[in-house]
Image (cartoon, rainbow, N blue to C red):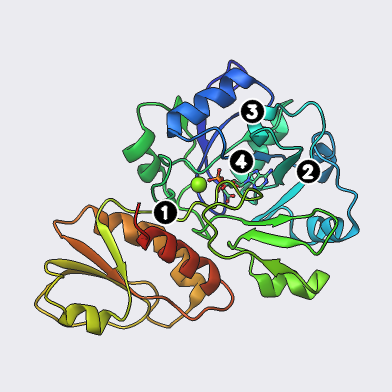
Amino acid sequence: MKNGGLVAIPTETVYGLAGNALDERVVSRIFSAKKRPQFDPLIVHCSSIGQISHYATLENPQARLLAEKFWPGPMTLVLPKKDVVPYLVTSGMDTVAMRIPAHEMTLHLLRQLDFPLVAPSANPFGYVSPTTPDHVNDNLGDVVDYILDGGPCQLGIESTIILFDNKIPTVLRSGSLSVEKIQTIIGEINVVTHSSSNPSAPGMLKSHYAPGKKLVLGNIELLLGMPDYDRVGVLSFREKFEHPKIVSQIILSENGDLEEAATNLFSGLRSLDKMDINFILAETVPNHGLGRAINDRLKRGASDK
Ligand code: TXA
Ligand code: MG
């Protein structure tokens, strides 16, 4: 990394494709490796709040409260940026997304570097995020210099992104830290849903997290009854379905546990995507806690490219 290499790193959410955040050549290699448009800004990862304050201003009292409560953890704060952060990282904006990941191996790495790491999820732009080293190797094996093997990701869905711009804080991306938990610390908060062209959230494109196979979201029982769908993979929340059309089936959590469902979502989508099927039929989950983040990923994965 000191020589400008790209290394896939484990975090508690998903694997990231990491490199020196302060070196524009490295940052630009990351955009190309992911085939990511440069209007979609990156998250800067640090090991401590002290380090964060070199790159962003953490003055907003509510942002501070959240930082002290939830970092290291699955939360990204969008804060006013300092000059050392290249505009390439922020897509020309004066704000920068910052996060301290809760993964011992990656924290240990960050502490040994004298620069922070940009780390977008280690998947090609628009595809499902990786939650194991194998997922990274499948998609980006040729373009990363190393994959740091920290095992499967504990949470499995990306961090929750919160914007502070002097008004009421806004959740730009639902993620592994639930809105309810944030509210217990700072009270009222806005939640942005599903915007495809919101300039304050350039990465919130509608068709994101999309598997290669067509993902159809709805009532699985009804979808199975429709002639349009044959040779299907089913991704259900807790129920097992029986139907001759079903080639393969993944149940996210038999106990109906939303955290378990979140952990299994991306690996479930990826394994169905590899099957010899024509469609993936899936259903939304209860829309509270981590269910909000799961539904967001499912809806975006199912929207037409
Ligand atoms: O859990 C995570 O956040 C993972 C792990 C690796 O840390 N990272 C991740 O990065 O999901 P990425 O690049 O896939 O998603 C980052 C999102 C982008 O969609 C982008 O739009 C948003 O963060 N973002 C970054 N900087 C921003 C800014 N200044 N203002 C608004 N949104 C920003
Ligand atoms: Mg991503």
Q: Which residue is mark 4?
A: 106
**Amino acid carrying mark 4 in the image:** Thr
Q: Earlier in the sequence, mark 3 or mark 1?
A: 3
Within-10-Å neighbours for mark 1: few <14, some 14–19, many 20+? some
Within-10-Å neighbours for mark 2: few <14, some 14–19, many 20+? some
* Residue drawn at the location 85% of the way across and 56% of the way down: 166
Q: Earlier in the sequence, mark 4 or mark 2?
A: 2
**Amino acid carrying mark 2 in the image:** Ser
Within-10-Å neighbours for mark 4: few <14, some 14–19, many 20+? many
**Amino acid carrying mark 1 in the image:** Ser
Q: Earlier in the sequence, mark 2 or mark 3?
A: 2
Q: Nearer the viewer, residue 147 or 115?
A: 115
Indicate which disc residue 48 carries: 2
- Work out whether 260 lies above or below 82: below
Is disc 1 placed on a helix, strand or loop? loop
- State the CA–CA distance, disc 1 to disc 4: 29 Å
Q: Earlier in the sequence, mark 4 or mark 3?
A: 3
Q: Which residue is mark 3?
A: 88
Q: Which residue is mark 1?
A: 207
Q: Single out the mark in the foreground, 1 or 2.
A: 1
Query: Residue placed farthest to the left in the image?
Result: 244
Within-10-Å neighbours for mark 3: few <14, some 14–19, many 20+? many
* Residue drawn at the location 58% of the way across and 18% of the way down: 25
